[in-house]
Amino acid sequence: MAIGEKDPITGRNTTGHEWNGIRELDTKVPRIVIYSLVALTLFSVVYWILMPAWPLGTTYTRGLLGIDQRDSVERAVERAAMEREVWAEKLRTLELTEVRDDPQLMAIVRESGRTLFGDNCAACHGMEATGSPGYPDLTSGSWLWGGDPDTLLETLRVGINSTHPETRFAQMPAFRRDRILNTGEVSAIVSFIRSKAQGIEIVSELDEQGVEKGQELFAQNCASCHGDDARGTPELGAPDLLDGHWVHGGDRVTLFTSIADGRQAHMPHWDGRLGELERRILALYVVDLASRDQEVAGHE
Amino acid sequence: MPEVHKKLERSAIGFVLAIIGVASIGGIVEIAPLFTIDDTVEQVEDMRVYTPLELAGRNIYIREGCYACHSQMIRTLRDEVERYGPYSLAVESQYDHPMLWGSKRTGPDLARVGGKYSDEWHVQHLIDPRSVVPESNMPAYPWLARNELRIDDKPGHLRAMRAVGVPYTDEMIANASRDAFGQAFPDSPMADGVAERYGTDTNIRAFDGHRPSLTEMDALVAYLQVLGRLTDAAYRTNGRDGEEE
Protein backbone atom coordinates (compact mmCIF):
# COMPACT_ATOMS: atom_id res chain seq x y z
CA MET A 1 0.00 0.00 0.00
CA ALA A 2 1.56 3.27 -1.02
CA ILE A 3 0.51 6.86 -1.03
CA GLY A 4 -1.01 7.83 -4.33
CA GLU A 5 -2.23 4.36 -5.19
CA LYS A 6 -5.47 4.58 -7.13
CA ASP A 7 -8.65 2.89 -6.00
CA PRO A 8 -9.70 0.68 -8.90
CA ILE A 9 -13.45 1.25 -8.53
CA THR A 10 -13.67 5.07 -8.18
CA GLY A 11 -10.37 5.84 -9.82
CA ARG A 12 -9.47 8.20 -6.98
CA ASN A 13 -6.25 8.38 -4.97
CA THR A 14 -6.06 6.70 -1.60
CA THR A 15 -4.44 8.11 1.52
CA GLY A 16 -2.29 5.09 2.04
CA HIS A 17 -4.04 4.21 5.33
CA GLU A 18 -5.36 0.73 5.62
CA TRP A 19 -7.39 -0.92 8.39
CA ASN A 20 -8.01 -4.64 8.03
CA GLY A 21 -8.02 -4.35 4.28
CA ILE A 22 -10.23 -1.28 4.14
CA ARG A 23 -8.50 1.62 2.44
CA GLU A 24 -9.30 5.32 2.77
CA LEU A 25 -10.04 7.44 -0.29
CA ASP A 26 -8.26 10.80 -0.48
CA THR A 27 -11.41 12.65 -1.59
CA LYS A 28 -11.08 16.39 -2.19
CA VAL A 29 -13.00 18.84 -0.05
CA PRO A 30 -16.25 19.61 -1.93
CA ARG A 31 -16.21 22.91 -3.83
CA ILE A 32 -19.26 24.25 -2.02
CA VAL A 33 -17.31 24.16 1.25
CA ILE A 34 -14.38 26.02 -0.28
CA TYR A 35 -16.70 28.63 -1.82
CA SER A 36 -18.52 29.09 1.50
CA LEU A 37 -15.21 29.60 3.29
CA VAL A 38 -14.16 32.22 0.79
CA ALA A 39 -17.56 33.94 0.92
CA LEU A 40 -17.58 33.99 4.73
CA THR A 41 -14.04 35.37 4.84
CA LEU A 42 -15.06 38.15 2.47
CA PHE A 43 -18.15 38.80 4.59
CA SER A 44 -16.01 39.11 7.71
CA VAL A 45 -13.74 41.63 5.99
CA VAL A 46 -16.80 43.75 5.08
CA TYR A 47 -18.07 43.32 8.63
CA TRP A 48 -14.76 44.53 10.09
CA ILE A 49 -15.04 47.66 8.02
CA LEU A 50 -18.69 48.41 8.82
CA MET A 51 -18.95 47.33 12.47
CA PRO A 52 -16.88 47.82 15.63
CA ALA A 53 -14.23 45.11 15.33
CA TRP A 54 -10.53 45.43 15.92
CA PRO A 55 -8.82 46.27 19.18
CA LEU A 56 -6.18 48.98 18.89
CA GLY A 57 -4.50 49.12 22.28
CA THR A 58 -6.59 51.50 24.35
CA THR A 59 -9.31 51.93 21.72
CA TYR A 60 -10.89 49.99 18.86
CA THR A 61 -12.10 50.45 15.29
CA ARG A 62 -15.66 51.82 15.45
CA GLY A 63 -16.79 50.80 11.97
CA LEU A 64 -18.19 52.98 9.20
CA LEU A 65 -21.83 52.41 10.19
CA GLY A 66 -21.19 53.74 13.68
CA ILE A 67 -23.51 51.18 15.25
CA ASP A 68 -23.57 51.14 19.03
CA GLN A 69 -25.95 48.91 20.99
CA ARG A 70 -26.50 51.55 23.63
CA ASP A 71 -27.58 54.12 21.04
CA SER A 72 -29.77 51.53 19.38
CA VAL A 73 -31.69 50.70 22.53
CA GLU A 74 -32.09 54.35 23.43
CA ARG A 75 -33.50 55.05 19.99
CA ALA A 76 -35.83 52.06 20.24
CA VAL A 77 -37.12 53.30 23.59
CA GLU A 78 -37.59 56.81 22.18
CA ARG A 79 -39.39 55.47 19.14
CA ALA A 80 -41.76 53.47 21.33
CA ALA A 81 -42.38 56.56 23.43
CA MET A 82 -43.18 58.53 20.27
CA GLU A 83 -45.68 55.90 19.20
CA ARG A 84 -47.34 56.12 22.60
CA GLU A 85 -47.36 59.90 22.39
CA VAL A 86 -50.73 59.80 20.57
CA TRP A 87 -52.40 59.05 23.87
CA ALA A 88 -49.57 59.69 26.33
CA GLU A 89 -49.83 63.42 25.73
CA LYS A 90 -53.43 63.44 26.93
CA LEU A 91 -52.68 61.20 29.88
CA ARG A 92 -49.93 63.52 31.01
CA THR A 93 -51.80 66.80 30.65
CA LEU A 94 -55.45 66.06 31.45
CA GLU A 95 -56.66 66.02 35.02
CA LEU A 96 -56.84 62.44 36.23
CA THR A 97 -60.58 62.78 36.82
CA GLU A 98 -61.02 63.90 33.20
CA VAL A 99 -59.14 60.84 31.96
CA ARG A 100 -61.54 58.66 33.90
CA ASP A 101 -64.45 60.03 31.85
CA ASP A 102 -62.74 59.15 28.56
CA PRO A 103 -63.53 55.52 27.74
CA GLN A 104 -60.87 55.34 25.02
CA LEU A 105 -58.11 56.53 27.31
CA MET A 106 -59.32 54.25 30.09
CA ALA A 107 -59.11 51.27 27.72
CA ILE A 108 -55.42 52.11 27.24
CA VAL A 109 -54.95 52.59 30.97
CA ARG A 110 -56.44 49.15 31.62
CA GLU A 111 -54.15 47.53 29.08
CA SER A 112 -50.80 49.10 29.89
CA GLY A 113 -51.75 49.46 33.55
CA ARG A 114 -52.09 45.72 33.91
CA THR A 115 -48.55 45.16 32.60
CA LEU A 116 -47.10 47.89 34.79
CA PHE A 117 -48.99 46.60 37.80
CA GLY A 118 -47.78 43.06 37.14
CA ASP A 119 -44.14 44.12 36.87
CA ASN A 120 -44.07 46.45 39.81
CA CYS A 121 -46.98 46.13 42.23
CA ALA A 122 -48.22 42.54 42.01
CA ALA A 123 -45.35 41.09 44.06
CA CYS A 124 -46.94 42.63 47.18
CA HIS A 125 -50.55 43.46 46.30
CA GLY A 126 -51.15 40.37 44.15
CA MET A 127 -51.93 40.16 40.45
CA GLU A 128 -55.61 40.97 41.10
CA ALA A 129 -54.64 43.70 43.60
CA THR A 130 -56.48 41.93 46.39
CA GLY A 131 -53.47 42.00 48.71
CA SER A 132 -52.60 39.70 51.57
CA PRO A 133 -51.98 40.27 55.30
CA GLY A 134 -49.66 43.26 55.56
CA TYR A 135 -50.25 44.33 51.95
CA PRO A 136 -53.54 46.20 51.54
CA ASP A 137 -56.34 45.01 49.28
CA LEU A 138 -56.58 47.77 46.66
CA THR A 139 -59.99 46.66 45.43
CA SER A 140 -61.82 46.95 48.77
CA GLY A 141 -62.45 50.69 48.63
CA SER A 142 -60.94 51.01 52.09
CA TRP A 143 -57.98 53.38 51.73
CA LEU A 144 -55.29 54.23 54.25
CA TRP A 145 -54.28 57.55 52.69
CA GLY A 146 -57.25 58.22 50.43
CA GLY A 147 -58.35 56.66 47.19
CA ASP A 148 -58.88 59.53 44.75
CA PRO A 149 -56.53 59.41 41.75
CA ASP A 150 -54.39 62.38 42.79
CA THR A 151 -53.84 61.08 46.30
CA LEU A 152 -52.88 57.69 44.90
CA LEU A 153 -50.50 59.35 42.48
CA GLU A 154 -48.78 61.07 45.37
CA THR A 155 -48.60 57.83 47.39
CA LEU A 156 -47.00 56.15 44.38
CA ARG A 157 -44.51 58.97 44.03
CA VAL A 158 -43.23 59.19 47.60
CA GLY A 159 -44.21 55.83 49.10
CA ILE A 160 -45.09 55.13 52.71
CA ASN A 161 -42.32 54.98 55.29
CA SER A 162 -39.98 54.79 52.32
CA THR A 163 -36.50 56.23 51.77
CA HIS A 164 -37.92 59.14 49.73
CA PRO A 165 -37.26 62.52 51.40
CA GLU A 166 -40.96 63.46 51.15
CA THR A 167 -42.28 60.05 52.13
CA ARG A 168 -45.66 59.61 53.77
CA PHE A 169 -45.00 58.57 57.33
CA ALA A 170 -47.15 56.55 59.67
CA GLN A 171 -46.39 54.39 62.65
CA MET A 172 -48.69 52.47 64.91
CA PRO A 173 -47.01 52.59 68.35
CA ALA A 174 -46.21 49.39 70.24
CA PHE A 175 -48.57 50.02 73.15
CA ARG A 176 -47.63 47.04 75.27
CA ARG A 177 -43.98 46.62 74.31
CA ASP A 178 -43.36 50.27 75.11
CA ARG A 179 -45.33 49.92 78.39
CA ILE A 180 -48.09 52.35 77.52
CA LEU A 181 -50.79 49.73 78.12
CA ASN A 182 -50.79 46.37 79.84
CA THR A 183 -52.05 43.07 78.46
CA GLY A 184 -55.54 43.44 79.93
CA GLU A 185 -55.95 46.93 78.58
CA VAL A 186 -54.87 45.92 75.09
CA SER A 187 -57.27 43.00 75.25
CA ALA A 188 -60.08 45.35 76.27
CA ILE A 189 -59.44 47.60 73.28
CA VAL A 190 -59.49 44.53 71.03
CA SER A 191 -62.89 43.61 72.44
CA PHE A 192 -64.19 47.14 71.92
CA ILE A 193 -63.04 47.29 68.29
CA ARG A 194 -64.42 43.86 67.52
CA SER A 195 -67.76 44.75 69.10
CA LYS A 196 -68.13 47.68 66.69
CA ALA A 197 -66.47 46.49 63.49
CA GLN A 198 -68.38 45.12 60.54
CA GLY A 199 -68.20 41.49 59.61
CA ILE A 200 -66.98 40.24 62.96
CA GLU A 201 -68.65 37.16 64.30
CA ILE A 202 -68.49 37.18 68.06
CA VAL A 203 -67.87 33.61 69.14
CA SER A 204 -65.32 33.90 71.88
CA GLU A 205 -66.20 34.82 75.44
CA LEU A 206 -63.09 36.98 75.47
CA ASP A 207 -64.76 39.31 73.00
CA GLU A 208 -67.46 40.12 75.55
CA GLN A 209 -64.98 41.11 78.22
CA GLY A 210 -63.90 44.69 78.73
CA VAL A 211 -65.86 46.31 75.91
CA GLU A 212 -66.74 49.35 78.02
CA LYS A 213 -63.27 49.72 79.47
CA GLY A 214 -61.94 49.31 75.95
CA GLN A 215 -64.10 52.17 74.74
CA GLU A 216 -62.64 54.42 77.42
CA LEU A 217 -59.07 53.36 76.65
CA PHE A 218 -59.72 53.80 72.94
CA ALA A 219 -60.77 57.41 73.47
CA GLN A 220 -57.61 58.07 75.49
CA ASN A 221 -55.05 56.24 73.34
CA CYS A 222 -56.32 55.56 69.86
CA ALA A 223 -58.82 58.28 68.94
CA SER A 224 -56.17 60.93 68.24
CA CYS A 225 -55.18 59.04 65.10
CA HIS A 226 -58.06 56.70 64.31
CA GLY A 227 -60.73 59.30 65.13
CA ASP A 228 -63.31 59.43 67.92
CA ASP A 229 -65.59 57.26 65.82
CA ALA A 230 -62.71 54.89 64.87
CA ARG A 231 -63.42 55.59 61.20
CA GLY A 232 -59.78 56.46 60.51
CA THR A 233 -57.91 59.57 59.41
CA PRO A 234 -56.58 59.42 55.86
CA GLU A 235 -54.33 62.46 56.45
CA LEU A 236 -52.37 60.41 59.00
CA GLY A 237 -52.65 57.09 57.23
CA ALA A 238 -54.66 55.76 60.17
CA PRO A 239 -57.05 53.08 58.93
CA ASP A 240 -60.81 52.89 59.44
CA LEU A 241 -61.18 50.18 62.07
CA LEU A 242 -64.85 49.49 61.58
CA ASP A 243 -65.30 48.92 57.85
CA GLY A 244 -64.47 45.22 58.03
CA HIS A 245 -61.33 45.54 55.88
CA TRP A 246 -58.11 44.77 57.71
CA VAL A 247 -54.55 45.41 56.62
CA HIS A 248 -53.06 42.81 58.95
CA GLY A 249 -56.16 40.95 60.13
CA GLY A 250 -59.20 41.42 62.37
CA ASP A 251 -59.01 38.23 64.41
CA ARG A 252 -58.26 38.59 68.14
CA VAL A 253 -54.67 37.44 67.97
CA THR A 254 -53.66 39.65 65.05
CA LEU A 255 -55.45 42.70 66.45
CA PHE A 256 -53.81 42.12 69.80
CA THR A 257 -50.38 41.88 68.15
CA SER A 258 -51.02 45.05 66.15
CA ILE A 259 -51.77 47.04 69.28
CA ALA A 260 -49.23 45.37 71.57
CA ASP A 261 -46.22 45.38 69.22
CA GLY A 262 -47.18 48.15 66.84
CA ARG A 263 -47.05 48.18 63.08
CA GLN A 264 -45.06 50.08 60.53
CA ALA A 265 -45.41 48.77 57.02
CA HIS A 266 -43.45 50.07 54.07
CA MET A 267 -44.45 50.92 50.58
CA PRO A 268 -41.47 51.76 48.34
CA HIS A 269 -41.48 55.04 46.47
CA TRP A 270 -41.68 54.88 42.68
CA ASP A 271 -40.28 58.30 41.93
CA GLY A 272 -37.16 57.61 39.88
CA ARG A 273 -37.99 54.00 39.12
CA LEU A 274 -41.15 54.82 37.18
CA GLY A 275 -41.76 57.97 35.16
CA GLU A 276 -44.61 60.38 35.83
CA LEU A 277 -46.64 58.93 32.94
CA GLU A 278 -46.28 55.39 34.26
CA ARG A 279 -47.30 56.47 37.77
CA ARG A 280 -50.36 58.25 36.37
CA ILE A 281 -51.36 55.11 34.48
CA LEU A 282 -50.96 53.05 37.65
CA ALA A 283 -52.96 55.47 39.79
CA LEU A 284 -55.81 55.40 37.27
CA TYR A 285 -55.54 51.65 36.87
CA VAL A 286 -55.88 51.09 40.61
CA VAL A 287 -58.80 53.51 40.98
CA ASP A 288 -60.52 51.84 38.07
CA LEU A 289 -59.91 48.39 39.50
CA ALA A 290 -61.35 49.42 42.86
CA SER A 291 -64.43 51.06 41.38
CA ARG A 292 -65.13 48.11 39.08
CA ASP A 293 -64.88 45.68 41.97
CA GLN A 294 -67.28 47.76 43.99
CA GLU A 295 -69.76 47.89 41.14
CA VAL A 296 -69.65 44.11 40.96
CA ALA A 297 -70.13 43.91 44.72
CA GLY A 298 -73.05 46.35 44.46
CA HIS A 299 -74.85 44.21 41.88
CA GLU A 300 -74.61 41.07 43.93
CA MET B 1 -0.89 24.35 1.52
CA PRO B 2 -2.38 20.83 1.42
CA GLU B 3 1.16 19.45 1.70
CA VAL B 4 1.85 21.51 4.83
CA HIS B 5 -1.40 20.30 6.34
CA LYS B 6 -0.59 16.73 5.45
CA LYS B 7 2.68 17.05 7.28
CA LEU B 8 1.16 18.83 10.26
CA GLU B 9 -1.64 16.37 10.84
CA ARG B 10 0.87 13.56 10.91
CA SER B 11 2.74 15.14 13.84
CA ALA B 12 0.79 14.61 17.08
CA ILE B 13 2.46 17.35 19.13
CA GLY B 14 2.58 19.78 16.23
CA PHE B 15 -1.13 19.30 15.60
CA VAL B 16 -2.05 19.75 19.25
CA LEU B 17 -0.06 22.98 19.38
CA ALA B 18 -1.74 24.17 16.19
CA ILE B 19 -5.20 23.44 17.65
CA ILE B 20 -4.36 25.35 20.83
CA GLY B 21 -3.10 28.24 18.74
CA VAL B 22 -6.21 28.43 16.59
CA ALA B 23 -8.64 27.95 19.48
CA SER B 24 -7.07 30.76 21.51
CA ILE B 25 -7.50 33.31 18.71
CA GLY B 26 -11.11 33.82 19.81
CA GLY B 27 -10.01 34.65 23.33
CA ILE B 28 -7.12 36.82 22.21
CA VAL B 29 -9.33 38.84 19.88
CA GLU B 30 -12.47 39.08 22.02
CA ILE B 31 -11.36 38.99 25.65
CA ALA B 32 -7.76 40.13 25.99
CA PRO B 33 -8.29 43.58 24.39
CA LEU B 34 -10.98 44.38 26.99
CA PHE B 35 -8.23 44.71 29.57
CA THR B 36 -6.57 47.55 27.70
CA ILE B 37 -9.47 49.37 25.99
CA ASP B 38 -10.44 52.45 28.01
CA ASP B 39 -14.16 52.21 27.18
CA THR B 40 -14.62 48.76 28.71
CA VAL B 41 -15.44 49.97 32.21
CA GLU B 42 -17.01 53.40 32.61
CA GLN B 43 -15.29 55.87 34.90
CA VAL B 44 -17.68 56.99 37.63
CA GLU B 45 -17.00 58.84 40.82
CA ASP B 46 -19.80 57.62 43.03
CA MET B 47 -19.28 53.84 42.73
CA ARG B 48 -18.92 52.38 46.19
CA VAL B 49 -17.72 49.03 47.45
CA TYR B 50 -20.00 46.50 49.17
CA THR B 51 -20.22 46.82 52.94
CA PRO B 52 -19.11 43.73 54.89
CA LEU B 53 -22.79 42.83 55.50
CA GLU B 54 -23.68 43.20 51.82
CA LEU B 55 -20.64 41.16 50.86
CA ALA B 56 -21.76 38.45 53.28
CA GLY B 57 -25.19 38.55 51.64
CA ARG B 58 -23.54 38.22 48.27
CA ASN B 59 -21.71 35.12 49.47
CA ILE B 60 -25.03 33.66 50.66
CA TYR B 61 -26.56 34.51 47.27
CA ILE B 62 -23.76 32.47 45.69
CA ARG B 63 -24.00 29.67 48.27
CA GLU B 64 -27.73 29.23 47.72
CA GLY B 65 -27.31 29.28 43.95
CA CYS B 66 -29.63 32.24 43.35
CA TYR B 67 -27.66 33.03 40.19
CA ALA B 68 -28.92 29.81 38.60
CA CYS B 69 -32.40 31.30 38.22
CA HIS B 70 -31.83 35.07 38.50
CA SER B 71 -29.67 37.15 36.20
CA GLN B 72 -28.16 40.49 37.19
CA MET B 73 -27.76 41.95 33.74
CA ILE B 74 -30.24 44.19 31.98
CA ARG B 75 -29.34 43.93 28.33
CA THR B 76 -29.52 46.74 25.78
CA LEU B 77 -32.94 45.66 24.56
CA ARG B 78 -36.03 47.83 24.62
CA ASP B 79 -38.26 45.36 26.45
CA GLU B 80 -35.66 44.83 29.19
CA VAL B 81 -35.06 48.53 29.66
CA GLU B 82 -38.80 49.22 29.86
CA ARG B 83 -39.39 46.42 32.33
CA TYR B 84 -36.33 46.53 34.58
CA GLY B 85 -34.87 50.01 34.16
CA PRO B 86 -31.64 51.38 32.66
CA TYR B 87 -29.40 48.76 31.05
CA SER B 88 -26.52 47.46 33.15
CA LEU B 89 -23.13 49.14 32.93
CA ALA B 90 -19.82 47.33 33.32
CA VAL B 91 -18.87 49.62 36.18
CA GLU B 92 -21.80 48.32 38.21
CA SER B 93 -20.11 44.93 38.48
CA GLN B 94 -16.64 46.42 38.89
CA TYR B 95 -16.33 45.07 42.43
CA ASP B 96 -18.11 41.77 41.76
CA HIS B 97 -15.69 38.87 42.09
CA PRO B 98 -16.98 36.72 40.54
CA MET B 99 -19.59 38.60 38.53
CA LEU B 100 -23.15 37.28 38.86
CA TRP B 101 -24.60 38.35 35.52
CA GLY B 102 -26.07 34.89 35.01
CA SER B 103 -27.49 33.57 31.80
CA LYS B 104 -30.84 32.11 32.77
CA ARG B 105 -34.00 33.72 34.03
CA THR B 106 -36.37 31.33 35.70
CA GLY B 107 -37.13 34.26 37.97
CA PRO B 108 -36.86 37.94 37.08
CA ASP B 109 -33.64 39.88 36.62
CA LEU B 110 -32.38 41.35 39.89
CA ALA B 111 -29.91 43.95 38.65
CA ARG B 112 -32.14 46.81 39.86
CA VAL B 113 -34.19 45.13 42.57
CA GLY B 114 -32.63 47.30 45.31
CA GLY B 115 -35.38 49.45 46.85
CA LYS B 116 -38.09 47.97 44.65
CA TYR B 117 -39.71 46.03 47.48
CA SER B 118 -39.73 46.50 51.24
CA ASP B 119 -37.45 44.59 53.62
CA GLU B 120 -40.50 42.86 55.13
CA TRP B 121 -41.50 41.65 51.71
CA HIS B 122 -38.05 40.20 51.03
CA VAL B 123 -37.98 38.44 54.39
CA GLN B 124 -41.45 36.96 53.95
CA HIS B 125 -40.74 36.08 50.35
CA LEU B 126 -37.51 34.26 51.18
CA ILE B 127 -39.12 32.35 54.04
CA ASP B 128 -42.20 31.40 52.05
CA PRO B 129 -42.35 32.76 48.48
CA ARG B 130 -45.91 31.60 47.83
CA SER B 131 -47.30 33.48 50.81
CA VAL B 132 -46.80 36.71 48.85
CA VAL B 133 -46.64 35.53 45.23
CA PRO B 134 -49.01 32.56 44.88
CA GLU B 135 -47.88 31.76 41.33
CA SER B 136 -44.16 31.70 42.26
CA ASN B 137 -42.06 28.58 41.76
CA MET B 138 -39.12 29.81 43.82
CA PRO B 139 -37.85 27.48 46.55
CA ALA B 140 -38.21 28.61 50.18
CA TYR B 141 -35.13 29.56 52.20
CA PRO B 142 -36.49 29.56 55.76
CA TRP B 143 -33.14 28.76 57.38
CA LEU B 144 -31.76 32.17 56.46
CA ALA B 145 -33.84 33.74 59.23
CA ARG B 146 -32.69 31.11 61.74
CA ASN B 147 -28.99 30.96 60.90
CA GLU B 148 -26.87 33.40 62.79
CA LEU B 149 -24.42 35.20 60.54
CA ARG B 150 -20.76 34.56 61.23
CA ILE B 151 -18.98 37.89 61.45
CA ASP B 152 -15.51 37.07 62.79
CA ASP B 153 -14.37 36.14 59.28
CA LYS B 154 -15.40 39.43 57.68
CA PRO B 155 -11.94 41.09 57.70
CA GLY B 156 -10.65 38.05 55.79
CA HIS B 157 -13.39 38.39 53.19
CA LEU B 158 -12.55 42.05 52.64
CA ARG B 159 -8.84 41.27 52.41
CA ALA B 160 -9.55 38.62 49.78
CA MET B 161 -11.53 41.15 47.76
CA ARG B 162 -8.72 43.66 48.10
CA ALA B 163 -6.30 41.09 46.75
CA VAL B 164 -8.28 41.04 43.49
CA GLY B 165 -8.52 44.80 43.22
CA VAL B 166 -11.46 46.06 45.33
CA PRO B 167 -10.29 49.25 47.05
CA TYR B 168 -11.05 48.38 50.68
CA THR B 169 -9.06 50.54 53.06
CA ASP B 170 -7.18 49.25 56.10
CA GLU B 171 -9.79 50.96 58.25
CA MET B 172 -12.63 49.14 56.48
CA ILE B 173 -10.86 45.82 56.97
CA ALA B 174 -10.09 46.50 60.63
CA ASN B 175 -13.74 47.40 61.33
CA ALA B 176 -15.34 44.81 59.07
CA SER B 177 -16.94 42.69 61.81
CA ARG B 178 -18.19 45.76 63.68
CA ASP B 179 -19.67 47.27 60.52
CA ALA B 180 -21.34 44.00 59.52
CA PHE B 181 -23.18 44.00 62.85
CA GLY B 182 -23.82 47.74 62.98
CA GLN B 183 -25.46 47.97 59.57
CA ALA B 184 -28.32 45.74 60.74
CA PHE B 185 -28.58 47.32 64.20
CA PRO B 186 -29.04 51.04 63.66
CA ASP B 187 -29.45 51.75 67.39
CA SER B 188 -26.22 50.03 68.40
CA PRO B 189 -22.98 51.99 68.85
CA MET B 190 -21.48 49.89 66.07
CA ALA B 191 -23.76 51.50 63.49
CA ASP B 192 -21.97 54.83 63.62
CA GLY B 193 -18.94 53.95 61.54
CA VAL B 194 -20.87 52.34 58.68
CA ALA B 195 -22.14 55.52 57.03
CA GLU B 196 -18.81 57.18 57.71
CA ARG B 197 -16.89 54.49 55.85
CA TYR B 198 -19.37 53.53 53.13
CA GLY B 199 -21.34 56.70 52.52
CA THR B 200 -24.49 58.29 53.89
CA ASP B 201 -26.67 56.56 51.28
CA THR B 202 -25.88 53.18 52.82
CA ASN B 203 -28.97 51.37 54.11
CA ILE B 204 -28.56 51.02 57.86
CA ARG B 205 -31.61 49.31 59.33
CA ALA B 206 -32.94 46.10 60.86
CA PHE B 207 -33.29 44.24 57.57
CA ASP B 208 -34.87 41.11 59.03
CA GLY B 209 -37.26 42.95 61.34
CA HIS B 210 -36.91 42.71 65.08
CA ARG B 211 -34.99 39.45 65.33
CA PRO B 212 -32.57 39.76 68.22
CA SER B 213 -29.46 38.45 66.49
CA LEU B 214 -27.66 39.13 63.24
CA THR B 215 -28.92 36.54 60.77
CA GLU B 216 -28.08 35.43 57.28
CA MET B 217 -31.43 36.99 56.35
CA ASP B 218 -30.06 40.40 57.39
CA ALA B 219 -27.09 39.91 55.09
CA LEU B 220 -29.02 38.66 52.08
CA VAL B 221 -31.70 41.36 52.29
CA ALA B 222 -29.01 44.04 52.74
CA TYR B 223 -27.37 42.72 49.57
CA LEU B 224 -30.63 42.57 47.60
CA GLN B 225 -31.53 46.11 48.66
CA VAL B 226 -28.26 47.50 47.31
CA LEU B 227 -28.44 45.79 43.90
CA GLY B 228 -28.29 48.49 41.25
CA ARG B 229 -27.75 51.19 43.88
CA LEU B 230 -23.96 51.22 44.28
CA THR B 231 -23.80 54.02 41.71
CA ASP B 232 -26.34 56.21 39.95
CA ALA B 233 -24.30 56.11 36.73
CA ALA B 234 -26.86 54.02 34.85
CA TYR B 235 -29.59 56.55 35.61
CA ARG B 236 -27.43 59.42 34.38
CA THR B 237 -26.44 57.91 31.05
CA ASN B 238 -29.57 56.17 29.85
CA GLY B 239 -33.01 54.90 30.57
CA ARG B 240 -36.15 56.55 31.68
CA ASP B 241 -35.05 60.07 32.36
CA GLY B 242 -36.05 60.90 28.77
CA GLU B 243 -39.53 59.72 29.50
CA GLU B 244 -39.83 61.56 32.76
CA GLU B 245 -40.39 65.02 31.37
Image: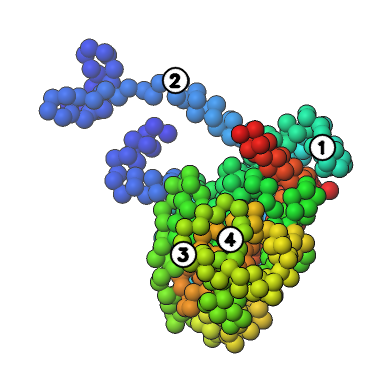
Crowding at dot 1, Cα within 10 Å, few <14 / some 14-19 / many 20+, comes out as some
Same chain assignment for discs 1 and 4? yes
Disc number at residue A99? 1
Reply above or below: A106 against B120: above
Q: Secondary structure at mark 1?
A: helix
Reply above or below: B238 against A99: below
Instruction: Work out which residue is located at the far left of the displayed protein and give it.
Output: A20
Residue A95 horizontal side relative to residue B158, left or right: right
Three-letter amino acid code at disc 2?
A: Arg
Residue A103 in the image: x percent, y percent?
78, 30
Crowding at dot 4, Cα within 10 Å, few <14 / some 14-19 / many 20+, comes out as some
Task: Name the residue beneath numbered marker 3.
Answer: A205
Distance (Cα) linking label 3 and label 1: 51 Å
Residue A86 horizontal side relative to residue A238, left or right: right
Reply above or below: A270 against A88: below
Three-letter amino acid code at disc 3?
A: Glu
